[in-house]
Image (tube, rainbow, N blue to C red):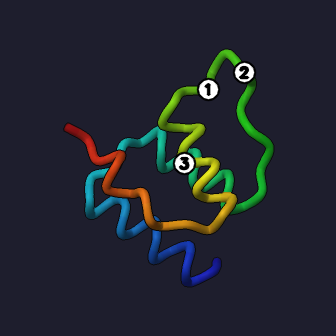
Amino acid sequence: MNQAYRDAITKMEEMNVQDEYILGWEGGFLGHPKREEQRLTEAYEAGYEDGSAKSTDNFADWVKA
């Protein structure tokens, strides 16, 4: 697996980022199709968008409360 991918996932886990965001980010980064519409969440969609762009800039916005 790509080292940038591993580093990003490790960073998100250490920051305690929401699981839905992480799942979306992983799918976007790897180029997977989005979930079916009824299972989309705001966190998943934000993660998917960031993962597709290979962006790590918004992790802090999705830290669990």
- The type of residue carrying mark 3 is Gly
The correct choice, above or below, for 42 with respect to 60 in the image is above
Image coords of residue 16 (percent x, y) = 27, 52
Instruction: Kindly identify the amino acid type of the residue bearing the numbered disc 2.
Output: Glu
The residue that mark 2 highlights is 37
Q: Residue shown at 59%/38% (left/top)?
A: 45
Please tell me which of labels 3 and 1 falls first in the chain: 1
Q: Secondary structure at mark 1?
A: loop
First along the sequence among labels 2 and 3: 2
Tell me how far mark 3 sits from mark 1, CA to CA. Answer: 11 Å
Image quarter in which the N terminus is found: bottom right
Name the residue nearer the viewer: 61 or 19.
Answer: 61
Eyeballing the image, is 7 above or below 43?
below
Residue 23 vs residue 46, the one in the foreground: 46
* Pointers 2 and 1 in contact (C-beta within 8 Å): yes
Residue 40 is tagged as: 1
The residue tagged 3 is: 47
Identify the image quadrant of residue 2. Answer: bottom right
Rate crowding at label 3 as few (under 14), some (14 to 19) or many (20 or more) other CA atoms within 10 Å: many
Q: Position of residue 33 (x, y in %)?
A: 80, 43
Looking at the image, residue 3 sits to the left or right of residue 60; the answer is right
What's the residue type where badge 1 is placed? Leu
